[in-house]
Image: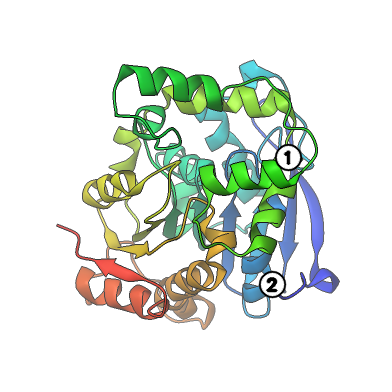
Amino acid sequence: MSPLPTSTRRALTAVSADGSRIHVEVYGSEGRPAVVLAHGWTCSTRFWSAQTAGLAAEQRVIVYDQRGHGRTAFPGPGACTADTLADDLEAVLAATLAPGERAVFAGHSMGGMAIMAAARRPGFREHAAAVLLCSTGSSGLVAESLVLPLRAGRVRTRLTRAVLGSRAPLGPVTALSRRILRYATMGPATAPERVARCARIVHACGRRARVAWSHVLDTLDLDAYVRELRVPTAVLVGTADRMTPPVHARALAAALPDCTGLTVLPGVGHMTPVEAPEAVTGAIRALVVAYLDADVRGGEVRACAVDDRTADTRTAEVGAATADVTTTEDVA
C-alpha cells in the first residue's frame, strides 16, 4: 500500500449540531473533485488509508472520525444515535465543501449508515453527486449477522447481541485476537498484514464508544431512508461478509431509487476497503468519472437522475473498474 500523501494533508475540526467536535482530514488540492469517506464501527480515518493514497493525486479526499473513534471524543452513550451520525456528516460537509459543491460519498458499514441517515438532510442533498455503500445494511443487522455459526433465530440473535455488545476490553493485539478478528470480519484468504492492520485499528477504539454504538446498530432501522437516497448509488459487498452479509446488499440494491449496480467480491469479508483496496478505490473512482468530472471541467452540472445512461450501462462501468476481482449482479 502506498503511504499517505502527508504533504497535502490538512486537519480541521467540524462542530456538530450538539457541539461535538469532529476530527476531519483533507487530502489533495482545492478545485479537484471531492470524495467524502465515512468509516465504520470501531474504525477510524486510518481505515481509508489505501483509498486516500490512491485517490488524493487526482481528487480531494475528505475523511473524518465518527464520534468516539480515532481523534473524535466520545460524548457519552446518549449522544450516539442514527440522527447524530447524520448530524456529524452534515457538519463535516459544512466545514469542507463550498456551497453547492458536489461530492462522491463512500461509506463502509456504519459509515454507510451515516449516509443513509442523512439522505433526507438538506446539507447532504446539496452536496451529494453519487454514493458507494460498502459492506453495510439498513436494518436487521444483528438478526442477519453470521458471526456465530448457528441457525437463524432468536437464540442466535440473542447471543450475537451479547457478543457484539460485550463490555470486555479488547486488550492488546495478539495472535489469538488476530485470528478472532479474521474469522468475524475478514475473508479466510486475507493477507496477514491486512489482518494485523485492521486489528490495530479496531483495538484502538475505546470500549465505551464500541459498546454504545453496538446498541445503536442493534436497533437501527433506516429502510425508509434508503428510499430517500435519490442519487446514483453503487452497492458493494464481499461474499464472506459475516457482519453485514450479502442479503443486506441485495436488499439495498432493490430498494434504492437509482442503484447503479451491485458488485460482489468473491471471498472477501466485511473489511472491504482494507481487504480489497483496489476494488473499492476503483468503484469510487468510477463514480467520480461518471458524476463529478464534468462539474470540475466546467461542464454542465449533471442531474441526479441521469437520462442518457441506463442503469445497466452504469453498472458495467463500475464493474469494469474492478473486473479482476468482482462479479457484478443484475439489479431487479
Q: Please tell me in which quadrant of the rendered image residue 81 appears.
A: top right
SS category of the residue bearing label 1: helix
Q: Is residue 46 left or right of residue 94?
A: right
Whether residue 31 can be seen here? no
Q: Amino acid at mark 2?
A: Ala
Whether residue 244 can be seen here? yes
Q: Quadrant of the C terminus?
A: bottom left
SS category of the residue bearing label 2: helix
How many callouts does the rendering have?
Answer: 2
Q: CA distance from mark 2 to mark 1?
A: 23 Å
Q: Which residue appears farthest toward the right when viewing the image?
A: 7
Q: Is residue 171 left or right of residue 142?
A: right
Q: Find disc 1 in the rendering and name its residue.
A: 203
Q: Please tell me in which quadrant of the rendered image residue 101 appears.
A: bottom right
Q: Find disc 2 in the rendering and name its residue.
A: 53
Seen at 68% across and 80% down, the residue is 57
Seen at 56% across and 35% down, the residue is 85
| Residue 241 tag number | none
Image location of residue 298, percent across then percent down: 50, 81
Q: Amino acid at mark 1?
A: His
Image location of residue 113, percent across then percent down: 46, 40
Seen at 69% across and 63% down, the residue is 193
> Which of the marked residues, 2 or 1, is nearer the chain's N terminus?
2
